[in-house]
Amino acid sequence: MQMDIQSLLIISISAVFISNFVLSRILGLCPFIGVSKQLDSALGMGIAVIFVMGVASAVTWVIYQYLMLPSDQNLIYLLLKGHIQNPPNLVYLRTLVFILVIAALVQFVEMVIQKTSPGLYRALGIYLPLITTNCTVLGVSILNIDSNYNFIESVVNGLMSGIGFTLALILMSGIREKLELANLPKAMRGTPIAFILAGLMALAFLGFSGLTIR
Amino acid sequence: MKIKEVISKGIWTENPVFRLMLGICPTLATSTSVQNAIGMGIAVIFVLTFSNLLISLIRSIVPDKIRIPIFISIIATFVTIVDLIMAAYVPDLHKSLGLFIPLIVVNCIILGRAEAFAYKNTILFSVIDGIAMGIGFTVALSLIATFREILGNGTWLGNPLFGSSFEPALLMILPSGAFFTIAFIIAFLNDLDQRRKRHDKPAVQ
């Protein structure tokens, strides 16, 4: 149990700081540049992403382990035991299945939130459809599988990666709000200066890469 | 609409990366070397061309309301094909691109072209658009990779350009270098546009 908590802590710190999704892996830049103009919308988008990444990590892990991997616990194999000899190997369908699951999941989450809490829906509503094409969600689902994480590790990695994304987004929006007042060369206004900022922030986050945890 | 126009749009006037700001994530993440950039570009050209072809082929029978899931399934199928082919024939490149091959699915260029072009145009134009946009993406990617590889590693396509005394700026290979490079390229293009506008104005008056 001690080992478990330790490994979860390592996963958390590395997901938030060391290999931050935006600043170190360079994923999810569209919302990072697009939704970082105001602090409020950045916070809304961030919470929606944390939520969806956590749920998506859990769901894709279960689907991959129990429907797609050729093991004795494969549910398709157990259901059709008399009809097929070997457990089916559906690993090659991973990309297709994951993206469809994520798209359906986002739609489902949107409907549930709409029915259960209109307040939250009003806050997150416009961000949820954008999340399907946010590469962080598919990225974290695939990374969980590639890193051989177990169920709890996957969920923690999903949530923490979402928090790392939100951290970068909030920092960025804070700086950009101030930047509105700055006197910039005309050509640098808008997207170019946002990229320069992202570069400087990535440089700052590079400092965390010296962090080794044992 | 002429074929020539579609081609020039894809490569220059509506360049997916620099003009439309689509597909920024894979552009920045895989442009650490020119070799990676070209590999990624070819993968995207393949997926974009074939998904445009298939979507344009079936556009009359696709119900309007569920077109996006259908597009995504088609794109994911071609991405899986590319993924498996690359894993089999160029395992080194596949390894260094890693996560970014399956992430072609969520590359906004491909879904964007499916929705904005292939769904409304004939097969021939859709295929040409796919190839042109794919080449535009590859050119942008290679340009960024050229800057980053020369400055950050002192090589181009793996060939050393400078003597052994050259000290590469490691920064350019790191994520920061990608952000700085694209920022300056976009700023340069903005400046070019503004100059042209300023230049055009007196002529109008």
Image: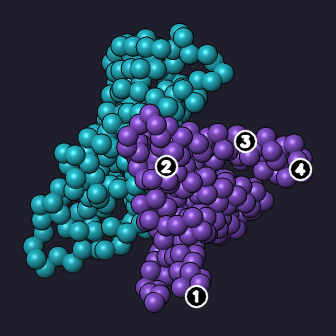
| Residue at 76%, 57% in the rendered image | A44
Comparing A160 with A39, the one in front is A160
Specify the quadrant that holds the N terminus of chain B.
top left
Q: Label 2 is placed on what type of residue?
A: Asn
Chain of residue at mark 4: A
**SS category of the residue bearing label 2:** loop
Comparing A99 with A183, the one in front is A99
First-in-chain label (1 vs 4): 1
Q: Residues within 10 Å of mark 2 (few under 14, many from 20)?
A: some
First-in-chain label (4 vs 3): 3
Circles 4 and 3 on the same chain: yes
Q: Label 1 is placed on what type of residue?
A: Gln
Picture coordinates of residue A185, whole percent (x, y)? 55, 58
First-in-chain label (1 vs 2): 1
Q: CA distance from mark 1 to mark 4?
A: 38 Å
- Residue under numbered circle 4: A117
First-in-chain label (2 vs 4): 2
Picture coordinates of residue B102, whole percent (x, y)? 41, 47
Q: Comparing marks 1 and 4, which lies closer to the viewer?
A: 1
Kindly tell me whether residue B67 is visible in this rendering: yes
Residue A108's label in the rendered image is 3
Residue A2's label in the rendered image is 1
Q: CA distance from mark 2 to mark 4?
A: 36 Å
Chain of residue at mark 1: A
Q: Quadrant of residue B201?
A: top right
Q: Label 3 is placed on what type of residue?
A: Phe
Q: Residues within 10 Å of mark 3 (few under 14, many from 20)?
A: few
**SS category of the residue bearing label 1:** helix
Residue A74's label in the rendered image is 2
Query: Is B122 displayed left or right of B142 in the figure?
Result: right
Q: Quadrant of residue B136?
A: top left
Note the chain letter of the purple one. Answer: A
